[in-house]
Image: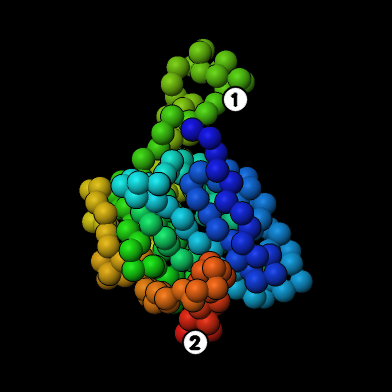
Amino acid sequence: MDLIIEPLLSLEDHLLSFSPRTPVAVVIDRLLRLHNAPEWRDPITLYFCGADDEGVRPQRTLSALEFLQLHSVLQRLRSPVYPTALGLIGNFSSVLLASCARGKRHLLPSAMLCVGPLEIADLPLSDAIGLAQRHQGPSLRDQARALIQAQLDHILAGLHLAPGLWQAPRVLSAEAAISAGLADAIVPIQTPTPNHEPNLEKHANHRQFQRDQH
């Protein structure tokens, strides 16, 4: 599957889109560019673009390590992050959205959030660790998985959400996600004007919606 790098929508307006197909290094680079901008006090609007072309399943989901990298950066930004979810969002992206600025976590009416156990896939090991593992058995990999799982559990506990939310896989509608505490509001849909610039109109309406709530 080819990687699709979503464009930086507007550095000036602090608008950034993010898809699981976007390399995490690119997302972090653009977040840090916004973090270091002269207008760093302005909030960053981060769009989670989750559905694939058929709208049936999430795109390639984040790995546990990618999630921890993004979560660490988001928690250290000087700028507040106002997220908005579009489409079907995977488990780790749902946690990232829930970890952003409370009161400013938005969903489009058609957004759906996956929740359930946060699975740790096979961990990439360096050649050095791989060599040591051949002599010591699977203990290094097990220790790494236990450490990552402890970090994931700590993040989930910090969200102060119902523990049962993550026990079984399911998909939440926008309304159910708000009821569960994962998000705060649904962004009203504006009818595009016939000027052939619906995206710009949508972003302008969303920024106005955020200012009205601030």
Q: Position of residue 212 (x, y in %)?
A: 49, 87
Identify the element where label 2 is drawn.
helix
For residue 142, what is the image quadrant? top left
Residue at the limit of the structure toward the top, as seen here:
135
Identify the element where label 1 is drawn.
loop
Residue 191 sits above or below residue 108 on the image: below
Report which residue position mark 1 lands on: 126
Q: CA distance from mark 1 to mark 2?
A: 49 Å
The front one of 199 and 123 is 199
For residue 42, what is the image quadrant? bottom right
Q: Position of residue 4 (x, y in %)?
A: 55, 43
Look at the image and tell me whether residue 3 can be seen.
yes
Point 26% across, 54% down: residue = 171
The front one of 181 and 164 is 181
Point 45% across, 17% down: residue = 137
Answer few, some or many: residues within 10 Å of disc 1's Cα (few below 14, many 20 plus, some between 14 and 19): few
Do residues under tags 1 and 2 come within 8 Å of each other at their CB atoms? no
Report which residue position mark 2 lands on: 212
